[in-house]
């Protein structure tokens, strides 16, 4: 059922979808004023309030806290946090450690590039899953262990040369802070087309390189759209970049791949690398997403030895390195057969949750244009809703009133140079909805969204 059947119409005289200008409800809503106060460049005569300087998810959590979220989180449905469920209830998934042994070495400072046994285990995992039959193999020297994905991105940014760095819109919110923090490169946005499913085509990469871009950063599978670039197109993109551009691939969601019938296949650019020390491809992954251990803060970067040496060294002045006891505990988890079985269980479980959420949303009248084939996110178009809830920020505000958290799409319009206004954003009328939490939490959150729509439907019928 479409929203037109619910008597909702996008052709409202107050609609910014038609005029491109802020609507009355947008200009006068508290949540829009808070957003503008927090984000320089998204309001006239912008200035930054440091107390609000945070990434999208953190900002959303702060607003939820103002509504009582931290007082009793169990009463809320957090569909905004980019984290998978961490319970031991997934069929076929191995049990996570409940205690951590602290060795004598674990009491000492660890190497800023990570301990050698873990680096070797990571290299072996990539070789078994992605480098079979290839002459060039990864070794422990091709791996740097870092304390989380953001720390990895910051380390990479710190060692980049002066360059034009291309990135795509929409993409992961934390890139915004990374891209705005360093001055050794100029960040150049490249919007992707909604009509094309936000797909990154090889032709798009060729255009970026032709205009002088020498570093390209992207998530794959992609956050927030839930789309993945896989072979043969991924191989074509890497062929275009070889000897021309450094390719930074955020592969944290590589295990959440639903394109191969949940057979455990992980998507990675490691498949297409010719020489592990010559191809300028940096891969970022970790225990956070596909091993469902976000609290451990154990992640890694895989790439050419020369890059990895610099990335390992800069940890000494950026973050100090990763917790050693957790590194030691991670080693047995990375046995390749164990990982393959884990990915099969993960993909089956999360695909089932995806299908449940999509079914509920369709029943509520949402038009799902692009079915996510990876990650655990749905990039949800609100443009068919009535004025007052058809933009991400106002919808987010209404969700808070129902004890539901989502992330407004505007946060995925990476704007490190602060040159675009909120109402020019192609992401303004979207939210990112996560099906990472447990099924119970998903049901609670979708019930809240249903109440919002029913309230607006009742108001509309009363007024008409």
Image (tube, grey):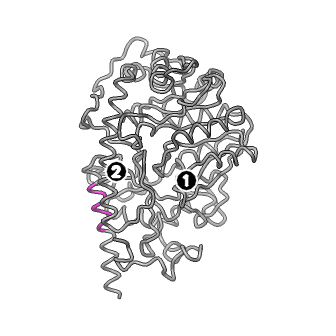
Residue closer to the observer: 242 or 292 = 242
**Within the image, what quadrant is residue 423 found in?**
bottom right
Residue 338's spot in the image, x, y percent? 34, 24
Q: Mostly what secondary structure, the magenta segment?
A: helix
At a point 42% along the width and 48% down the height, the residue shown is 373
Q: Name the outermost residue toward the bottom.
A: 464
Q: Which mark is residue 170?
A: 1
Q: Does the magenta stretch include residue 98?
A: no
Look at mark 2 in the image and give the residue it sits on.
354
Number of numbered discs present?
2
Q: How far apart are marks 2 and 1 (CA)?
A: 20 Å
> What range of the chain is rendered magenta?
443-451
In the displayed structure, 122 sits above or below 407; it is above
Image side of residue 193 versus residue 354, left or right: right
Within the image, what quadrant is residue 129 found in? top left
Q: For mark 2, does the 10 Å Cα neighbourhood hold few (<14), some (14 to 19), or many (20 or more) residues?
A: many
Whichever of callouts 2 and 1 sits on the residue coming sooner in the sequence is 1
Closest to the camera, between mark 2 and mark 1, is 2
Q: Which mark is residue 57?
A: none
The residue at 48%/51% (across/down) is: 224
Q: Is mark 2 on a helix, strand or loop?
A: helix
Q: Quadrant of the N terminus?
A: bottom left
Q: Position of residue 135 (x, y in %)?
A: 57, 18
Q: Position of residue 266 (x, y in %)?
A: 44, 34
Q: Residue at image x 43%, y 22%? A: 327
Comparing 259 with 139, the one in front is: 259
Q: In which quarter of the image is the C terminus?
A: bottom left
Q: Are marks 2 and 1 in contact (CB under 8 Å)?
A: no
């Amino acid at each position: 059922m479409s929203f037109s059947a619910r008597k909702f119409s996008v052709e409202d005289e107050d609609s910014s979808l038609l005029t491109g200008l802020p609507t009355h409800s947008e200009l006068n809503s508290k949540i829009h004023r808070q957003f503008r106060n927090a984000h320089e460049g998204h309001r006239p005569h912008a200035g930054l309030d440091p107390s609000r300087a945070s990434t999208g998810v953190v900002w959303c959590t702060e607003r939820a806290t103002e509504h009582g979220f931290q007082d009793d989180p169990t009463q809320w449905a957090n569909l905004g946090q980019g984290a998978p469920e961490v319970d031991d209830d997934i069929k076929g998934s191995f049990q996570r450690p409940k205690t951590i042994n602290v060795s004598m070495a674990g009491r000492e400072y660890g190497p800023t590039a990570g301990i050698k046994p873990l680096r070797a285990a990571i290299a072996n995992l990539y070789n078994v899953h992605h480098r079979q039959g290839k002459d060039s193999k990864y070794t422990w020297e091709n791996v740097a262990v870092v304390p989380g994905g953001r720390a990895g991105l910051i380390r990479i940014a710190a060692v980049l040369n002066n360059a034009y760095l291309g990135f795509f819109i929409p993409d992961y919110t934390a890139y915004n802070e990374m891209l705005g923090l360093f001055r050794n490169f100029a960040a150049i946005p490249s919007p992707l087309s909604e009509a094309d499913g936000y797909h990154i085509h090889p032709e798009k990469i060729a255009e970026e390189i032709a205009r002088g871009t020498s570093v390209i950063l992207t998530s794959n599978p992609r956050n927030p759209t839930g789309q993945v670039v896989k072979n043969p197109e991924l191989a074509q993109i890497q062929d275009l970049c070889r000897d021309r551009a450094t390719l930074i691939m955020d592969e944290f969601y590589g295990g959440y791949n639903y394109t191969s019938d949940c057979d455990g296949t992980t998507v990675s650019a490691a498949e297409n690398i010719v020489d592990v020390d010559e191809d300028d491809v940096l891969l970022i992954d970790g225990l956070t997403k596909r091993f469902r251990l976000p609290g451990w803060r154990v992640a890694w970067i895989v790439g050419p030895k020369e890059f990895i040496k610099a990335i390992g060294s800069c940890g000494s002045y950026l973050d100090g390195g990763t917790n050693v006891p957790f590194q030691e505990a991670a080693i047995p988890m990375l046995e390749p057969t164990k990982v393959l079985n884990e990915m099969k269980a993960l993909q089956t479980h999360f695909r089932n949750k995806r299908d449940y959420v999509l079914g509920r949303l369709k029943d509520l009248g949402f038009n799902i244009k692009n079915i996510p084939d990876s990650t655990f996110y749905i990039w949800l178009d609100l443009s068919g809703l009535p004025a007052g809830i058809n933009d991400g920020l106002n919808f987010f505000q209404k969700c808070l009133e129902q004890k539901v958290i989502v992330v407004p799409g505007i946060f995925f319009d990476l704007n490190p140079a602060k040159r675009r206004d909120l109402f020019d954003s192609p992401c303004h009328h979207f939210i990112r909805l996560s099906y990472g939490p447990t099924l119970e939490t998903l049901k609670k959150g979708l019930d809240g969204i249903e109440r919002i729509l029913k309230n607006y439907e009742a108001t509309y019928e009363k007024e008409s």
